[in-house]
Amino acid sequence: MVVSKQTASVTGPGRTHRATGSPFSLRFLPGGRRARERLVFLAFLLPATIYIVLFFGYPLYQDITISFQNYGFSAVVAGHGPYVGFANYSAMLKSGVTIRALINTVVFTVASVFFQFLIGFAMAVYLNRKFAFSGLLQRLILIPWVMPLVITGTMFSLIFSTSNGLANELLQGAGLIHSPVGWLTSGDLAVLAIIIANIWAGIPFNAILLYSGLQDIPEDQLEAAKVDGANAWQRFFKITVPSMRPVILIVLMLGVVYTAKVFDLVVVLTNGGPDNESQLMSSWAYTQAFGLFNFGTGTAVGNILLVFCLLVGVIYLRVSKDEAGAGAMR
Amino acid sequence: MKNTRRAVHLISMIVVGIVLFVPLLFPLYWIIVSSFQNLSTIYASAPSLFPTHLSGSNYSTAFSTILPNIGVSLVISLSVVILCWVVGVPAAYALARRGGRLADLFILIMLITQMFPGISLSLAFYTIFHQWGLLGSYTGLILADASTGIPFVVIVVRAFIVTLPGELFDAAAVDGAGPLRMFSRIGLPLAVPAIMTVGLFTFLWGWSDFVNAYTLNSGSGPQPLTLGLFKFASQYTSNDGDIFAAATLAAIPTTILLFVGQRWIRGGLRAGALKG
């Protein structure tokens, strides 16, 4: 400490003066440089810590406690309701709609992630071939990704509209169907429509991340394999895929977490209908809380989803650590 | 022989390109074209994939409805960015400059927050904000929208500052710079790329948020673009033309942002690519 002060005075009195005179100086504080630094760092961490406690810690506490209470409108006003033990959870798990919402969420998540990944990977490989419009195309495909999901949902509700939507027009034009299909008015088709919309919205994320993963593969490795007589498929499965393992895992895991909690698309496209047949866990939690004004059952449904997301998240953190995923997080 | 093979290759590349990219881009084209057509053309039985009778009449209603929502969204998103920067960047700097077990725990908590489903937070926010009197307000929505953004800022900016050469800070220490001066003169300027990236992402999240707006501000208070479009689309179910126009208008701001901020977006996608 003494040394650094001496050096400072050696570099010139002007400099030292400016340092002490600046509004950033903390020389008035007692203690040495290290103590001051520690104090500043603690002050830097304080607002973020308070924020996390108030806007993650407290909500999590609310979600847990409310799910064990009978929490209707009067409880919202009072700030607490009577405790009912596991009644909310057992009521929800007995409900056919919850089971349907669970199945829908799993099907929705698996199908979305699978097709987003497959199509995204194909696009990434295509973009990696460096052609004239590659740069422009990369920009264009990001448009669906930066678009708020509410707009995507609105767009697809027009596309899947029964009377004059694009989907029916194209299918009829191709002769695949003879009369218009009610996409959003039958449960299974509605889920399919939500899945298609979500795949559309999620492809860019997969494509761009996988594309940057492809660019990290050393060119000479692929060249060497080519010289050794490996064909394109062999090169793809023996070199490209193995060296992209960390990126692939990260894309898939993040895909699962982010897809399982999708809310906007369902609400805009079907609002869970018809007759709750296209509910996902997220929209079902909302319907309980605001449709039926039962926050107890609403948070119970939300907590089931939360536990699932956290489980996948923990696996993701594990895998990304083991797989030196830190490289991709850089 | 070689020329034919090259031509076949080129044609097959073009075909593959069309198969891959047209389904992705065509819906956008269809919405835009439809937004410029009057209802009778949209409702014509034959698919109207090519623009005929272009007219901007759909836009008058859409414009007057959506424009105030765009203003609200702008205020909210910019406030979210500033809040995330002010709270997140200093924390990121402190964690980057000083590691340790406690810092690791802090970062782990930040990562876990990114897994929270929006609906779980929103339901809790509703009950909390009811007590705090923040329902249907700008403040409440901004605070809620910044909640996933702040941990994201901490994660990404910290990861960036850690990669900066330590000698820069050592040299400043030798020059007698205190911790605050080092932050403002060295840490901040060098971290600008990461700060821009997280700024862009948190802006996009604030702009795209629906779950918080729908739960907290649905009844009253400022109506952001997502909520405005949703209400507009469910209200005017009879007039698809207006909805086509409103959806097109609503998609313009983020598309502009995409082209302006392209390099920051790519950086952010690489930096962990989180979208809530």
Image: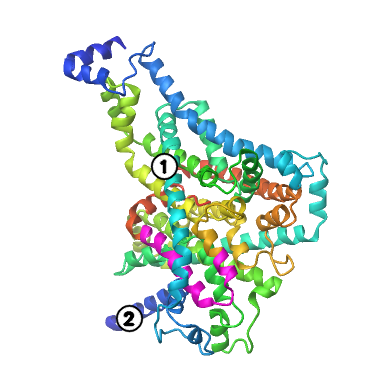
Amino acid type indicated by mark 1: Ile
Q: Earlier in the sequence, mark 1 or mark 2?
A: 2
Q: Is A158 placed left or right of A34 in the picture?
A: right
Quadrant of residue A33 in the image? top left
Q: Which residues are magenta?
A: B231-258
Nearest the eye: B156 or A268: A268
Crowding around mark 2 (Cα neighbors within 10 Å: few <14, some 14 to 19, many 20+) is: few
To which residue does mark 2 refer? B5
Rendering colour mode: rainbow
In the rendered image, the quadrant that contains the N terminus of chain A is top left
Q: Position of residue B231 (x, y in %)?
A: 57, 64
To which residue does mark 1 refer? B82
Frontmost of labels 1 and 2 is 1
Q: Are marks 1 and 2 on the same chain?
A: yes
Nearest the eye: B60 or A244: B60
Vertical side of A284 occupied by A13: above or below: above
Quadrant of residue A15 in the image? top left
Q: Residue at x 44, y 32 (%)?
A: B91
Vertical side of A274 occupied by B193: above or below: above
Q: Residue at x 69, y 42 (%)?
A: A63
Q: Position of residue B276 (x, y in %)?
A: 53, 51
Q: Is residue B85 visible?
A: yes
